[in-house]
Each structure stands twice: as C-alpha cells, then as structure tokens.
Image: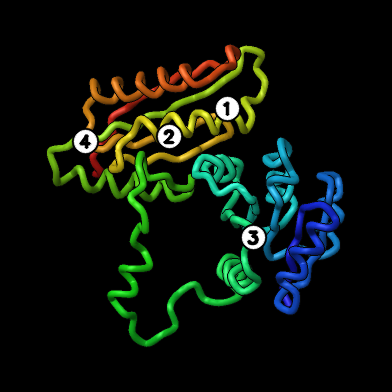
C-alpha cells in the first residue's frame, strides 16, 4: 500500500487520513522542521499540504518536500478557498494539483491514484463516447477574463500558440508582470492575488495567463501587436494600482513578441 505525507494540524491530518484509509497509509507533520523525519521514515508517493494551515510558509514547505523526496513526487495542496486567484497563487507556490475541500473520500482517492500512478490516468473502456468526452472537457459556465493555466501547462500552450501563428497573420505577445516591494520583502499571498485579479479583469477570454512564481504572472496576448500589448499591460498596471491600498508595491512588466516555431 502506497504512503502519503500529510502536512496539517494533528486533527486535520487525522481527518484526511480517514478519507484515504484503506487505500493509502499516511504519516503527518505539523511544522516544517518535522518534514525531514517524516520523509526519512517512509518516503511518500505524494504529499498533501493544507494551504490554509501552512499560511505564509507554503512555498517553504513545498520546497522542503520536493527537495527531500527522491524523484518527482507530486505535491497536492488542499484549501477551502475555491477562487481562481487562490488557485493561481497555489500553483505559483509549486503545487502540482489543488484539492478544493470538502471532497468525498472517493474523489480524493481517485485524484491521488491519478497523481501517484496507482491507476492509469486513461480511460480503460474499449471505446470512448464522443458526446461524453466533449461534455467532460467543456467549460460549464461562461467565464470572463483570460484562460488561467498552471505553470507546467503554460509551456505547452506557448509551444502550441507558436506553432499556430506559423499559419496565420496574427501576432502574439508574451507579457511578464513582476510585483515587488519597496522593502525587498516577499509580496505575499495578498499581493499576487491582487495581481491575478487585475490580469483576469483586464484580459479577454482568448488570452492565456499563469502565475509563474511567487511574485510574477505571465500572459499570452493572442492577436495583439506591440502597441496593443503595451496598451493591455498599462491597463493591468493601472487597474492594480487603483485597487491596491499598499503603497509599498511596485508593478513592472516586460513584453516580447512570440516568434513563429521553426
């Protein structure tokens, strides 16, 4: 039976352990300093971190897990906040997947199975129903703003877009927004969430965005030329400052044209 490392309060770890009981064994840690011992005792197939409990130490905890476990162990982050900005922030901290709690035991185990390779992540039926496939991948609501993706997925979208413009007359701009503080301190969760929200409000549905670090968001502006790219970037900067009450924040950007794939 595969092993899961849980970072949470004692009560929280026990509650999550009951969700996966019978499918996985687990150990827990409640402080970053406890992680090394837990990893050495039984190298986990995955780690589940309660982001609401970890707070501002989330990036540190994820880093310790990824450095301490041999191989590319998946790190799953759980939270009760289901906002898009929150999800972008968690992915930017290094999370490989996000569990929006509460979830039933069956769904939690299925997600863990897929991430740990306990079961194949492909449909095992001989034939796939086309209508059901389209239904499963379609967006259920008409979302506004850019299409938000995880950092690892952004690279594939970038390559896909670069291939696409080879056959079209459209230009695409890559925009990097960097948030910093006057005191050189961490911008924190609040800062990156405000930036993510400004990006979401100012972009179109056809654009693609991703949190790529603790203080940066990267965007693909589909069909925008250099002037249009700067116009959008300045709109995001203006929106951010109008909503931000913290005068210590500085928001800068860099913009480049996406080159056609060779």
* SS for dot 3: loop
Q: Position of residue 110 (x, y in %)?
A: 58, 72
Task: Compute the Cα span from label 1 to label 3.
Answer: 26 Å
| Dot 3 and dot 4 residues touching (CB under 8 Å) | no
Q: Along the line of sight, which residue is nearer the eye, 209 or 101?
A: 101
Which-is-in-front pick, marks 1 and 2? 1
Q: Neighbour class for label 2 at 10 Å: few (<14), some, many (≥20)?
A: many
Task: Compute the Cα span from label 3 to label 2.
Answer: 30 Å
Name the residue beneath numbered marker 4.
Answer: 223
Q: Quadrant of residue 255?
A: top left
Which-is-in-front pick, marks 3 and 4? 3
**Picture disc at residue 102:** 3
Q: Which residue is drawn at the image coordinates 37% and 45% (left, top)?
A: 147
Q: Position of residue 247 (x, y in %)?
A: 58, 12
- In this view, the residue farthest toward the bottom is 126
Give left or right: position of 67 versus 119.
Answer: right
Q: Neighbour class for label 1 at 10 Å: few (<14), some, many (≥20)?
A: many
Q: Which residue is drawn at the image coordinates 24% and 48% (left, top)?
A: 163
Which-is-in-front pick, marks 1 and 3? 3
Name the residue beneath numbered marker 1.
Answer: 191
| Dot 1 and dot 4 residues touching (CB under 8 Å) | no
Task: Compute the Cα span from label 1 to label 2.
Answer: 15 Å
């Amino acid at each position: 039976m595969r092993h899961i490392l849980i970072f949470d309060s004692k009560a929280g770890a026990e509650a999550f352990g009951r969700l996966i009981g019978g499918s996985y064994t687990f150990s827990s840690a409640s402080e970053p300093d406890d992680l090394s011992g837990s990893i050495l005792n039984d190298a986990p197939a995955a780690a589940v971190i309660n982001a609401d409990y970890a707070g501002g130490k989330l990036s540190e905890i994820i880093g310790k897990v990824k450095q301490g476990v041999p191989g590319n162990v998946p790190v799953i982050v759980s939270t009760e906040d289901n906002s898009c900005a929150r999800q972008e922030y968690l992915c930017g901290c290094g999370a490989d997947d996000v569990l929006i709690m509460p979830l039933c035991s069956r769904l939690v185990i299925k997600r863990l199975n897929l991430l740990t390779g306990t079961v194949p992540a492909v449909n095992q039926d001989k034939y796939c129903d086309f209508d059901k496939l389209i239904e499963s991948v379609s967006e259920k609501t008409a979302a506004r703003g850019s299409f938000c993706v995880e950092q690892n997925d952004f690279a594939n979208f970038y390559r896909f877009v670069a291939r696409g413009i080879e056959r079209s007359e459209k230009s695409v701009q890559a925009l990097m927004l960097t948030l910093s503080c006057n005191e050189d301190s961490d911008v924190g969760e609040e800062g990156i969430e405000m930036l993510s929200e400004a990006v979401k409000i100012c972009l179109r549905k056809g654009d693609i965005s991703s949190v790529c670090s603790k203080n940066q968001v990267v965007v693909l502006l589909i069909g925008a030329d250099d002037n249009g790219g700067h116009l959008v970037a300045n709109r995001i900067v203006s929106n951010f400052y109008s909503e931000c009450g913290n005068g210590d924040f500085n928001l800068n950007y860099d913009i480049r044209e996406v080159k056609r794939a060779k």
